[in-house]
Image (tube, rainbow, N blue to C red):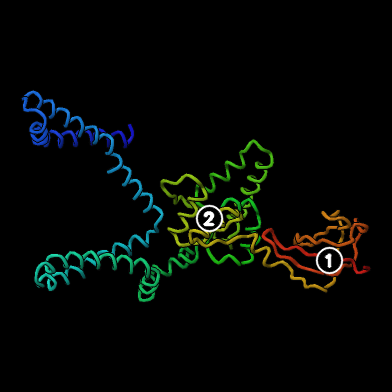
Amino acid sequence: MSLDFIARIIGLVLFGIIGGVFSESIGLFIQQIWTSSPIALVIYQIIITLLFSLIGFLIAPYISVRPINAIRKQLSKVSAQALIFGLVGLIVGLISGALLAYPISLLPPPLGSILPFVAVILFSYLGIVIFVARGKDINHWLRSISKGGGDKDAEQTGLQDSRRILVDTSAIIDGRIADIARTGFIPGRLLIPRFVLNELQYVSDSADNLRRQRGRRGMEVLAELQKDPSIPVTITDIDVEGVREVDERLIVLARQLSCPILTNDYNLNRVAELQGVSILNINELANAVKAILLPGETLEMKIIQEGKEYGQGVGYMEDGTMVVVENGHKYIGKTVPISVTKVLQTAAGRMIFAKPDED
C-alpha cells in the first residue's frame, strides 16, 4: 500500500468529518434558496459530506505526501554543513527578533502589533542567509581557534573538505588515475562510493566483450590503487536517497561533501559545472601537459596513413597528438623531418599541421 493511497484515505475521512460538521449550516443556506423540505435538508447534508470526502480523497497527497517528498529531496541535495549553519542562523535570528520585538511592541497601533511579527520573520531569514553564505568562513574560524585534536585527526586521515576527491567509474576504467596518483598530483584521499563500485562490477559482468574487458581493467586498476600504500583510497558506503542515476548521485554527494569529482565523462563534466561542482578531468590534464610546438619548429615524424584531404599524410606524436602533414601522402611508412605550420586547439584536443622540410 503506497503512501499516496494512505494519505487519500486519511484525507477522505478528515474532510468527510469536516463536511459533516459544516453540512448542516450549508444545507440550511441552500434550503432557504431552493426549498424548505426537511427531506431536502438531509439530502443536502449527505451530498455535502460526500463532496468534502471526495475533495479530501483527491487533494490529500498534494497537501501532505508530495510536499514532504519534495522538501526531503531538496534537503538531500544540501550539504550537512549548510543544514547545520542554517539551523544555527535560524536560532540566532529568532533570538534577535524576539529581543527587538518588545521595544517595537510599545509603538502605537497598528505598528505595535504588526512590526514585532515582521521583525522576527526578517531576522530569521537574515540569520539563515548569512550563516549559510558564510558557513565555510565560520567553519574555518572555529577550526583555527579550536584547541582540540579533531582537526589534526582529520588531516591525518585526509577527510577534510579540501582533501577529498570523489572518483567516477570512467576515471577508474581509464586507468591513468593510478599513474597520476603515484606522482603525487592528486592532493587528497580518493573516495569511491559503493554505488560506483557496483556500476564497475556491472560493466565487468556485461555480455558485450569490449565492455567486459573495460570493466575488468577498471577492477584491476582499483586493486592496484588499494595495494599502493602511498595512495589513500577509501571505499565508502555513503549514498544519496531519492536519486537513481549514478552521475546525479555523484553530483549531489559532491555538493554535500564540498569536494570535486575525478572523471573522464564529458556529460558528467558539463552537468556538474552547471551545478557548481568542481571537476578534475583527466583528459583536460593530459591535453594541458602535452608538448607545446610553435609554428616554424621542426621534428621527425613517421607518416602512417592518409589524411582526409587530397595529398595529406597523418602521423601521431608520443602523447597521441595528431599531426597532419601537407603533401605527406608520398611519405607514408617513412620517417621524415617536418616543419610545424599551424597549431589548433579544439574541444577534442590539440591538432598540429605541418609540411615536409623538403617542400
User: Which residue shows up at 26% across the image and 34% down it?
Assistant: 57
Q: What residue type is disc 1 on?
A: Ala
Within 10 Å of the Cα at label 2, are there few (<14), some (14-19), or many (20+) other Cα atoms? Answer: some
Q: Secondary structure at mark 1?
A: strand
User: Which residue shows up at 83% across the image and 59% down it?
Assistant: 315
Q: Is residue 137 left or right of residue 179?
A: left
Q: Is residue 188 visible?
A: yes
Q: Is residue 8 left or right of residue 81?
A: left
Q: Is residue 171 visible?
A: no
Q: Foreground residue, 1 or 101?
A: 101
Distance between the alpha carbons at the discs numbered 2 and 1: 37 Å
User: Which residue shows up at 22% across the image and 65% down it?
Assistant: 94
Above or below, 88 against 244 in this view is: below
Q: Count how many numbered circles sit on residues in the image.
A: 2
Q: Secondary structure at mark 2?
A: helix
Q: Is residue 46 left or right of residue 182?
A: left
The answer to whether marks 2 and 1 mark residues whose Cβ atoms lie closer than 8 Å is: no
Provide residue 237's location: percent of width, then percent of height. 46, 50
Q: Which residue of the protein is positioned furthest toward the top in this rendering? A: 39
Q: Residue 53 appears in which quarter of the rendering?
A: top left
Label 2 sits on residue = 271
Q: Say which quadrant the N terminus sits in.
A: top left
Within 10 Å of the Cα at label 1, are there few (<14), some (14-19), or many (20+) other Cα atoms? Answer: many
| Earlier residue among tags 2 and 1 | 2
Provide residue 65's location: percent of width, then percent of height. 30, 42
Label 1 sits on residue = 354
Provide residue 337's location: percent of width, then percent of height. 89, 67
Above or below, 27 against 318 in this view is: above
Q: Residue 339 appears in which quarter of the rendering?
A: bottom right
